[in-house]
Amino acid sequence: MAKKEYAHLIKPLVAKKAPPGLYSEPRFWMEGKDMEGFNATFSFGFVKKPGVCHPLEGALVHPYDECLVFAGIDNTNMLYLGAEVSVVLGEEGEEHVFTEPSVVLIPKGMPHGPVTYKRVDRPIAHYTIGLAPEYKATPVPREAKTSGSKYGHLIKRLITYIDWKEFDARKPGPPAPDEPISYAFIADRAGILHPAENGVGPGNGDQIAWLFGKDLEGFDVNFTWGFYSRCGKWHRGGESHYHPEAEILVFVGLDPDDLSYLGCEQELGMGKDYERHIFNTPTVAICPGGFPHLPLITRWVDKPYGFIVVCLSGEHASPWVEA
C-alpha cells in the first residue's frame, strides 16, 4: 500500500499521565510537539467522582491564556452537566460554583485553582485548551477562599451566543448548498446548534455549542463541544475547505470507563486531492493554516460520540476550495 502523504496529520489519542500535580487520573494529553507544531496544548478526560484537580494542591499560574471546559455527556440534553463544580480564581482566592456546562477562562498570569468537584451525579467531560505549544505552570500557595464577583465574567455557559436579531430574521427552509451557513439558522432559543436536522449535512452534529473570541473575553481561539450520532457526509456545501489559522479536529467517545472507545468510524479527506483517512478510535486530525480538509463522512455509528474543534483564531473563516 502506498504511503499516504498526510498520515502524520492523523494521530490516535492515547491516555497518559498529565504533568505532576495536575490530575490524578490518566487523560488524553497533547502539546504542540505531539501535534505537528500546533500552537496550543489540549487535554481531555472524564470526571466520575467528587475530588480536586488543576492542581491537586495550591494554585497555578500559566504564561498564556487557558480555557477549562466542563461538559455533560448526556447526549439527549447538552444543557445538563450533572455535577457541582467549584473553581478558585485570582490572588484573592475568589470561589465560583456552577452546575451548568461551562467554560472557565484563565487569562495569562492569573492564579487559579484548585477545581473541586463537590458533587458528581453523572460522569462529566473535562477538557483544557492552553494557548501555547508547551505546558508551563508555576505553583503558588493558596490561602483561604473568598466570595465575590470580580472574576464572575470569566465563567461562561457552554452555549452558542447567537445574534438574536439574525435569529428572528431567519427565512424558512434549508439553505442552498452554496449558501454560507448562519449559526442563527441552525440554533434553538437555548443557544444549541442542530446542524444535522437543519440541512447542513446528514452526518453532522445533533447538538453543538460553539464559542468564539468575542464570547471568550477576546481569547484568540474558537472551539466547540458536540454530540453526534448519525451516518453520512457532514457538509452538503462543498468537498473541502480551509481556515487561515490552524485547527485540530478531535473525535472522542462518551464512555467514561473507556477512554480508548470511540463508537463510530470516520472517513476524512486531507489535502487538495482529498487523500482518504479512516479511523474508528479516538483521534485528532491536525489542519495547518490554509490546509484543505474534508469531506468528512461518518461510515457507521454504534454509540453517540463527541467531537471538538479547536481553531487558533477568535473567528472561524471557512472558505470552500474550488474542485
Image: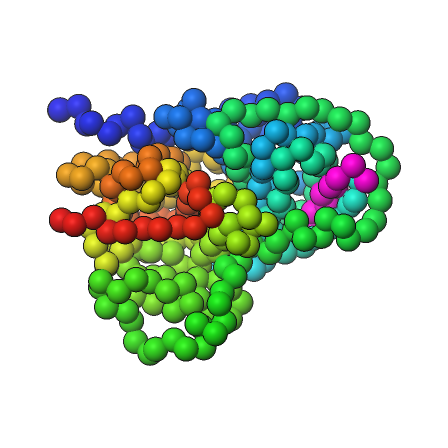
Is residue 107 left or right of 251 when viewed as pictured? right
Question: Residue 309: x, y in percent?
Answer: 42, 45
The image quadrant that residue 261 belongs to is top left
- Residue 86 covered by magenta stretch: yes
Inspect the magenta stretch and tell me whether residue 224 lies in it. Answer: no
Question: What residue is drawn where x is 48% and y is 67%?
Answer: 163
Residue in view at x 45 percent, y 56 percent: 208
Placement of 232 over or under 130, stated as above or below: below
Residue 92 in percent (x, y) is at 81, 40
Q: Does residue 176 appear to the left or right of 42 in the view shown?
A: left
Q: Please give the name of the residue rendered at 22% of the width and 62% of the height, measured from the top-left corner.
A: 178
Magenta: main secondary structure equals: strand
Side of 93 relative to 45 (left or right): right
Can residue 197 be seen here? The reply is no
> Is 60 in front, or is 107?
107
Q: Nearer the viewer, residue 139 or 98?
A: 139
Is residue 189 in view?
A: yes
173 left or right, relative to 22: left
Task: Please say if 155 is above or below 179.
Answer: above
Magenta stretch bounds = 83-92
Please tell me which residue lies in front, 294 or 61: 61
At horizontal 38% and vertical 56% (from top left) the residue drawn is 205
Give the x, y percent position of residue 251. 39, 41
**In this orientation, which residue lies closer to the viewer: 152 or 98?**
152
Query: Residue 37's quadrant in the figure?
Result: top left
The number of numbered badges drawn on the structure is 0
Q: Vertical placement of 173 versus 263: above or below?
A: below
